[in-house]
Image (cartoon, helix red, strand yellow):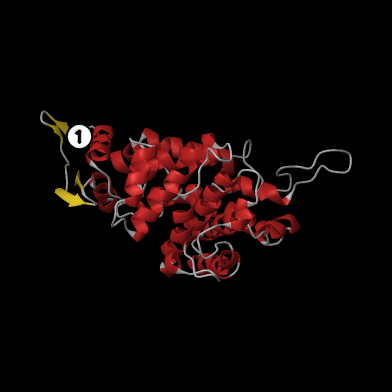
Amino acid sequence: MDSLSDAALYNSIAFALTSTGSSSYSLTTVQFIKAWFLDDATKMNPNLNYGQMNRGPTGQSGSHTGILDLKGMAKVLTAIEILRKTKCTDWTADLDNKMIAWTKEYIGWLESAPISLEEKAATNNHGSFWYNQVAALKLLVGDKAGALAVTNTFFTKQYMSQITANGEQPLEAARTRPYHYHAYNLAAMITNARLSAYAGDASVWNKTTNEGSTIKTALDFSMTLSADTSGETSYVAELYPSVAAVGAVYGDTNGKYATFLAKGEPAYAEEAYFLWNQPLAGGEAESAALLKASGTTTAGGPKATKGTTTKDNGASLHSVNWVLSAFALAGLQYIFLL
């Protein structure tokens, strides 16, 4: 599912940036969505009855942890919203109606199946991802009030006990891969906040837990953790999209987030997450990397096509809003997710 959701999202973004009406990118997006959800020969049934199945003679049934396998639905929603808002001719009214019908049936299962309700009740990242999956699905079918009800429930229930005063996430710290799970739940919390904001309530970014912490507090604490200590060096980059998101939403007055990214991933401006986490400051090297990726250069070196050279966070940088201008012209609202 992760590969499917990424393919749908990135192809839809490429379409919005380069084309109108129809293109190979939009056709590819539609092809993936149809194969997974709509075509009779290949589509997924609208349930996860056999997700992460318990095997054996007394098993043959899914487990509540299998609900997590469709956490990528938030990206699928984003892809479909891009096709809708750009009036892509490949995404027809018939396909949209069929996708809505499939989604409504799946929502019904998620809100009633015992294994799904068990996942909903989970106090750690499993519960966090359940809420953003259901909120995204509500948005897909046009139910903004329902989506807000879902995110509001998360931010008044699970969220309230997930972050301590110093930003620790104790339920994730207790796991076998604590660095990974800190980043994992941060991604879920940030996605829930973005979905809430898209549905009309951005106040959750400043929602404090029982101990007075916010999503930013949790991110700041996670930045102090060492993946080396727990033998998780292969997971170190999982935190970067959350760093970019927090820097973009809360600001980066002292350059802490840009510096952290530049140290860990010097060419972070070439990463997809940099695109939908704007404005996010970076130095000359990061701006140059983004401009190189866009193909916008001059004989004298990189030059921003829009905006001006400014000072921010102690570094001289170009305002690299060429991509955001393209999205604004397309009339898109930004709901890009981790």
Give the class, few, some or many, for how many residues have Cα within 10 Å of label 1's Cα (few <14, many ≥20). some
Q: Is residue 185 above or below residue 30?
A: below
- Residue 204 spot, x, y in % from top left: 45, 67
Mark 1, residue position: 296
- Residue 269 spot, x, y in % from top left: 32, 40
Q: Residue furthest front?
A: 229
Q: Nearer the viewer, residue 265 or 166?
A: 166
Amino acid beneath label 1: Thr
Q: Is residue 325 above or below residue 131?
A: above
Q: Residue furthest top?
A: 299
Q: Quadrant of the N terminus?
A: top right
Is residue 162 shown left or right of residue 242? right
- The part of the image, by quadrant, that contains residue 303 is top left
- Residue 238 spot, x, y in % from top left: 49, 42
Residue 70 shows in this picture = yes
Q: Residue furthest right?
A: 57
Q: Is residue 107 above or below residue 27?
A: below
